[in-house]
Amino acid sequence: MAVQSLPADFYTSFLSKEAKERRPSPIRSLFPLEATPGLISLLVGKPNASTFPFTSLQFTARSPTDPSKETSQTLTGDELAEGLQYGPTAGIPSLIEWVHGLQEKVHGRKKGEGWRVSIGSGSQDIIYKAVHAMVNPGDAVLVESPVYAGVIPIFHTLNNEMVEVATDANGIVSSSLRSILENWPVEKPKPKVLYTVPYGCNPTGMTATVERRREVLALAREHNFLILEDDPYFYLYYGPNPRPPSYFALELEEPEVGRVLRFDSLSKILSSGIRIGFTSGPAPIVNALDGHTATANLQTPSLTQTIVFALLDSWGYDNFLTHTENVSKFYKEKRDVFEAAMQKHLGGLAEWTPPESGMFYWFKLLLPSTSDSDSEGDSEALITTKAFENGVLALPGTAFLPNGRKTAYVRASFSLLSESQVDEALRRLREVILEAQNLSLIYNVFHELRWFPRVACFYFECNRAHVGN
């Protein structure tokens, strides 16, 4: 049965004014014509490659099937020439074709379903451009809460109203999302986008269940919004159950596809410094994103794309997936070490749900309240001052809340630390929490003692009057 995709004109209302008003690059829009057979191009001011000093590039990489062995790759000739020269805005064709094949193998999405791929300088680059392609200044946007701190400044600079959708250990709470949308003011346009990190969410570490994802997709169709599926930890899943399908894959169950704009990253599985990410989604939205790239930074560097493609092409899809399985096992071992240290040092002092993907722990400190309105305590002062002074650095949860409200939660990353470092870090944090609890106890005792003389005197006077009568 053929997959039905939403028509191109459906996305007109989803494009921002900025995207609609942006004019195509007069040079880059004609790039594809250079491939016309027999054509002599006088178009582009490309430097002559004969002036480049690089003649070859060689690198070695560990084998996915046997990490004790290394394989060598050498870039020369046309392959190197492509990497040293300006390239297409959306990415070099060989890497784009490889990504298309990956999305078909992993997510079941085939060409001809109304979607396409664009390569970016990391997923952060393309998320920023996608938001600007779809969201106008002042628009309301739906964001899971807590939310990845890196998108908060993007929405802030556009003066967007970030409408927080509750999450728990199973992902977005669909009843919260439904309540928000069903009670939306009639005179106010509903949000066009929902931002979510569904695997190993940064900061909460949660991985959304397939049931929650289906519910969110149904609401996207019912209330007409697009899902920004930011998924840098997809390949870092290590939960006990099979990995849930992505939103990008699940929308094949919908009557029409085209409500998901997916963001993948190679930062967590190949190299964060190489800055390669890619987006897969509705062609009109990706075209608008590319329009931004053409006027901002022209393209993702050809050389890093060429290096990445040479490695991925030599591996093939099966070896690439074997490599990602090795990476996820690595982080599971790191998670297990951190979990053991959490149980050892913070049992009874914090509450948490162990993550099933990614590299973060999100835990609630059991702190004494500082006021009647602050029943759960506030982690910010303790983490940013006392914990730092005691030699441990983490992020207070308020950094991941769009409204910056107080919270007792903390985010900790376990990706880099050795077992001994994890143990020492959490031991130091334990000291700080216990100190805060003891100080609160002392404060409360003195608070009570401060009022005791007045109460005692009142009691004495009352009783003396009663005896006199």
Image (cartoon, rainbow, N blue to C red):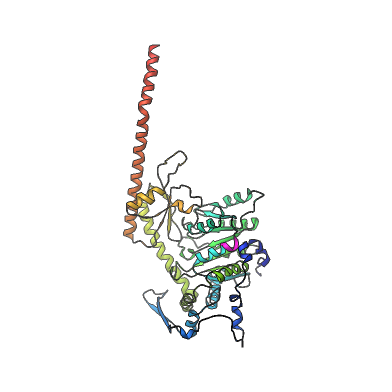
Residue 468 position, x and y percent, is: 38, 12
User: Is residue 206 rendered to the left or right of residue 224?
Assistant: left
Main SS class of the magenta portion in the image: helix
In which quadrant is the N terminus drawn?
Answer: bottom right
Residue 310 position, x and y percent, is: 47, 78
Residue 23 position, x and y percent, is: 62, 69
Task: Please check the rendered image and state whether residue 133 is part of the magenta-colored stretch, yes or no.
Answer: yes
Q: How many badges with numbers are in the image?
A: 0
Q: Can residue 362 be seen in this view?
A: yes
In which quadrant is the C terminus drawn?
Answer: top left
Residue 161 position, x and y percent, is: 57, 53
Whether 255 is drawn above or below 371: the answer is: below
Residue extent of the magenta highlight: 131-135
The one nearer the camera, 160 or 92, is 160
Q: Which residue lies furthest to the top in this view?
A: 469
Whether 118 is drawn above or below 180: the answer is: below
User: Is residue 223 rendered to the left or right of residue 210?
Assistant: right
The residue at the point 35 percent across, 26 percent down is: 453
Task: Please check the rendered image and state whether residue 443 is part of the magenta-colored stretch, yes or no.
Answer: no
The one nearer the camera, 291 or 7, is 291
Q: Is residue 7 visible?
A: no
